[in-house]
Image (cartoon, rainbow, N blue to C red):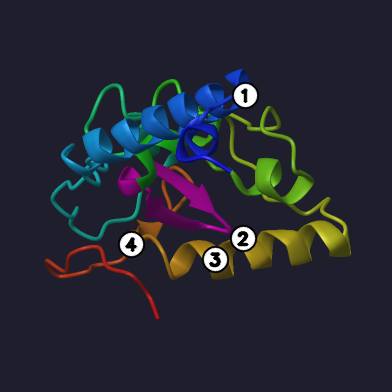
Amino acid sequence: MDFAAVLEMSALDWVLLALLLVLFYRWLKRRGEPEIALPKPVTVAPLPKQDMTLAELRKYDGAQDEHVLFALNGTIYDVSRGRNFYGPGGPYSAFAGRDATRALSTMDVKDVRDEWDDHEDFTADQKDSALEWETSLKTKYPAVGKLIKDGDPRTDYSGLMSSIEL
């Protein structure tokens, strides 16, 4: 066997060599590129703790104010960090500035009401679902205060700021 016969390459060998060189080139090129920067989380100043009526809550829909709030089981949460979900154009933007208890407990994003809803017609499963959502939200988002009816007394929070309840 002569040395020249060992170095002969078929067309398949050339294709495989070319593919290997292209992959090696792309690997080298990629090593020099900076990592993709993750978007910075939205940070807004905390709101002072306060009770709100539905009309007052309505302005915190992310379009009229930088804060995005919604109520669940009578507690108002500042979900501004989740603006991509709850803010304008987000999949759950219908909750912003409203009482989302009914929508979350029925798993129907469109089931949000603009008037006071006492949730008395909830089934046991819907009540459980609302409580599960509340448990999840209160560990992620700061509580701003309570959702109250027009004319109800307001709690004096004495300058406290909204915070996550543990």
> Was residue 70 drawn as part of the magenta stretch in this picture?
yes
Residue 97 in the image: state x and y as whole percent.
Answer: 42, 35
Question: Distance of mark 2 from mark 1, alpha carbons?
Answer: 59 Å
Residue 72 in the image: state x and y as whole percent.
Answer: 55, 54
Quick check: can you spot residue 45?
yes
In which image quadrant can residue 25 be found? top left
Of the two numbered discs 3 and 4 on the same chain, state the one appearing first in sequence.
Answer: 3
Residue 142 badge? 4
Judged left or right of residue 64, residue 111 is right
Which residue is under mark 2?
133
Mark 1 secondary-structure assignment: helix
Amino acid identity at mark 1: Leu
> Was residue 152 drawn as part of the magenta stretch in this picture?
no
Judged left or right of residue 158, residue 4 is right
Q: Residues within 10 Å of mark 2 (few under 14, many from 20)?
A: some
Q: Are marks 3 and 1 in contact (CB under 8 Å)?
A: no
Looking at the image, is 56 positioned above or below residue 52? above
